[in-house]
Amino acid sequence: MKTFSESRLVAKMLLEINAINFNVENPFSLSSGFLSPSYIDCRKIISYPKVRTKITELMIEKIDREIGSEVIKHIIGGETAGIPFASLVAEKLQLPLSYVRKTTKKHGKNKLIEGEIFSQKECLLIEDLMTDGKSKIDFLNKIRDHNIICNYGMVVFNYDIFPGTEKRLKENKIEIHYLACWEDVYNEILEDSAFDTITTKQIKSFIDDPIKWSNERRYEY
């Protein structure tokens, strides 16, 4: 669900703004619980106007091409990293915007969804990235519990390496569209010879079997 040129461009931009950090010696802990030699911080995108604008344009092009902008009636951002991207897309498409919380507020109206709730309208869930899809399903269930139709999601970056992710998404009847994945980043790294051989090999090892890579380091560290 991506084209070569746009996906490599996104990977290149992420590397250029140092949104992808590497540390083989002291692995990062992902929200999914796995250890990784890299941390991808898509939040940095919003601090770079040209990159931010291009990412927004690519998201909208992808919506038009793969979903159909006429299908989407409502944009919902995932708390918190998905909110700025959802805001940018909603503004460009002139669509209603809301956001879904991870947990209810402890004060006020105890809402899970902030903004207007458009029942029986097709929404697009927007987040910054996806590892194994579990947090997307959690957001999806919260949205559907409010009688909102949600069959589509979009992220800037999809790890696209964890087993069971596609099955999980299919079982929950949601399509996740994305701009770039680890394959794109790895190919960009190889082309630019951006890192030393040891780091590059560790990244390839992680991509080939992230669970094995994580388990080995979890034992070690």
Image (tube, rainbow, N blue to C red):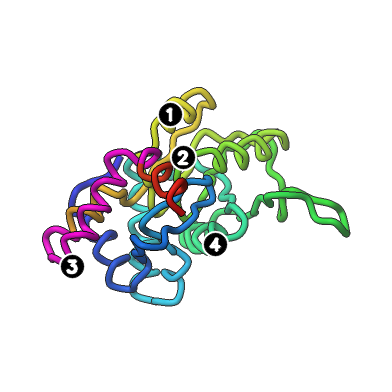
Q: Is 131 on the left or on the right of 75, as rendered?
A: left
Q: Nearer the viewer, mark 1 or mark 4?
A: 1
Residue found at x 60% / y 34%: 149
Mark 1 or mark 3, earlier in chain: 1
Label 1 close to label 2 by CB (< 8 Å): yes
* Label 4 – label 3 distance at C-alpha: 33 Å
* Label 2 – label 4 distance at C-alpha: 24 Å
Q: Is 54 on the left or on the right of 28, as rendered?
A: left
Residue 180 among magenta residues: no
Mark 1 or mark 2, earlier in chain: 2
Mark 1 or mark 4, earlier in chain: 4
Q: Amino acid at mark 2?
A: Asp
Label 2's element?
loop
* The N terminus - image quarter: top left
Magenta stretch bounds: 189-212
Label 1's element?
loop
Majority SS type along the magenta span:
helix
* Label 1 – label 4 distance at C-alpha: 30 Å
Label 4's element?
helix
Q: Amino acid at mark 4?
A: Ser
| Disc ID at residue 48 | none
Q: Nearer the viewer, residue 216 or 18?
A: 216
Label 3's element?
loop
Q: Nearer the viewer, mark 4 or mark 3?
A: 3
Task: Identify the residue under disc 3.
Answer: 194
Task: Identify the residue under disc 1.
Answer: 164
The x and y percentages for residue 204 are 23, 48
Task: Identify the residue under disc 4.
Answer: 87
* Label 1 – label 3 distance at C-alpha: 31 Å
| Disc ID at residue 132 | 2
